[in-house]
Amino acid sequence: MLNAIQIEVLSVFIISTIILLTNKVRYDLVGIVSALSLILLGVISPTNAIITFASLPVFLLAVVMIISKAISDSGIMEKFGDFLTKKFNNGYLIITVLLLATGIMSGFMSDVALTLMMIPLAYSLADKLKKSPSKYLMPFAFIAVMGGRFTVASTSSNLILYSLWYQNYHTFLPYFTFTYPGFIILLLSVPLIIVISIMIPDKKKAEVEIENYKTGEYLTEAKIGPDSEVIGKTVAEFEKIYSVRIVGIYPGRIGRKDRVIESGDIIIVRLKPENVTAISAIKGVTIAPSEVIQESTSLNEIFVMPNSRLVGRSIIDLKYASRFNLAVLGISAYGKIISGRLRTILLEAGDVLLVSGNEKDIAEFIIENGLAPLRKRDIKIIKWKSGLFALGALILAVILSTAGVNILVSYGIALVIILATRSINFKDMYSRVEWPIVVFVGSYLVVGGAIISSGVSVSIDYWIAGSVVLLFIITFLLANLVGNVASAIIMGPIAFSFSNPLVALTVVAMAASCTFLTPFGNQSNLLVQSPGGYRTKDYMIYGSIMVALVFVVTMIYALA
């Protein structure tokens, strides 16, 4: 029989889980409200909540994110992939090396950062092998998630388990505690993911849609000045001369194709990227919100990622891009219905922006706003010095952690080195942290603490009855429903009741990282969903294959 406190804790957890599953409210807000609810109910004190929120895994997660972004921003991984695609002709050899390299790096870096780096490579590989990018985007996301399980600092869930072990036994886990079976799973997953890549249909129709999505038509606004040479021309004449389509004119409506263009008109034009320069060169025509494109700049197509800070902002809000010396000239026309001025359109994950500027400024704009170039050739800046220093600092952190130095100290030293060598600017350091994830981890640690202190976890432990099979299944299901963080928080303490708690904790670590079955189960899955055109059932089908591999290897390890 549950007591009043346990009922309150379970109610908060169940309600928050339902809200998370609807995917209608940001997960960090759900975490904050859940933690505050438990404080207001008196289940946990404000002091304990603050201490839990600011605990080791939360701080270490932020540090790992900064180091990962320093390596990611340098571009050396993209350069490595670009070298492979140019050097070798065998597609299977290229994808094998890339998958293995990504999986290994995922043991030390953020899986989201790695997936972000691999998206342009997936397009490049698809172009080289004349395949649909859909055949490679999901595999790269899967290997980034699959690889991040064989070290204690590779994923948020492993960091939480690392902290829980210390709280329970007052000793730190070795850095490579989860390497066996984690690394065996990684090695076996490479050929399996290649098989999945082959299984994914090479949809020629989808490929055409993706190509149009990348380099298709865009919507932009142009203002007609009083001295413009197009004044007096009809809509039909304008479209024929400049190979574009006018989809809106303000003030007023298009009406007919014989509508005459007048001074002061704002025309919304649907065009291909190569026609932007021609339109901007028309006397008396200004492409909004930019000025006339300078000859020294280039046009670049930039993909809006699901975690971009630009999601939900209107086109007019992007005028701040001028501080990067950039001009946002248009937005992908795919799926857009125009019912007003272009500036009122809200950006969504999956949109593509047409941006004018020099490569360095565009690179900084992409990095700061969580964007991604659709084609590798658009961003050619490789910061070798920064990348090598960041990689060296990461290797040093691994060596120190393996030698027994506190993992927080080890990664702290790596962060100091990165800042000292200016591999990342101090003023930009905080912008490299995915704060919603950090906030969610911290707040859900508070929820997890309440589940443990209230005795709810004991009830779960009773139903598991010492079965590693049930331990894996329940952890894996929770991970796909509410995320790896919540599953590790809830199931980690239960592992300590097993006769061999380290083996049980490893089972939890392997299962908590099995977030393959839904697009929203892991951010890496979400990153590739739109550009890959994947449906939920695609994740269910191919993700089940990955889960089966992890389950079999983990059970062999646990029951041996």
Image (cartoon, grey):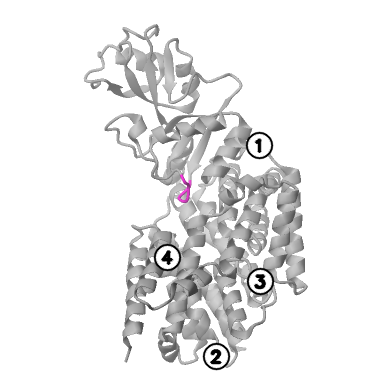
- State the mark number for residue 380: 1
Does label 3 or label 1 sit earlier along the sequence? Answer: 3
Residue 133 appears in the picture as rendered: yes
Residue 233 is situated, as x and y percent measured from the top left of the image, at 32, 9
The residue that label 2 is drawn on is 498
Residue in view at x 57 percent, y 56 percent: 140
Does label 4 or label 1 sit earlier along the sequence? Answer: 1
Residue type at the position of mark 3: Phe
Does label 1 or label 2 sit earlier along the sequence? Answer: 1
Relative to 93, 311 lies left or right? left
The residue that label 3 is drawn on is 183
- Secondary element type, mark 2: loop
Residue 156 is situated, as x and y percent measured from the top left of the image, at 55, 67
Residue type at the position of mark 2: Phe
In 3D space, how far apart are the residues under numbered discs 3 and 1 (Cα atoms)? Answer: 33 Å
Relative to 326, 2 lies left or right? left
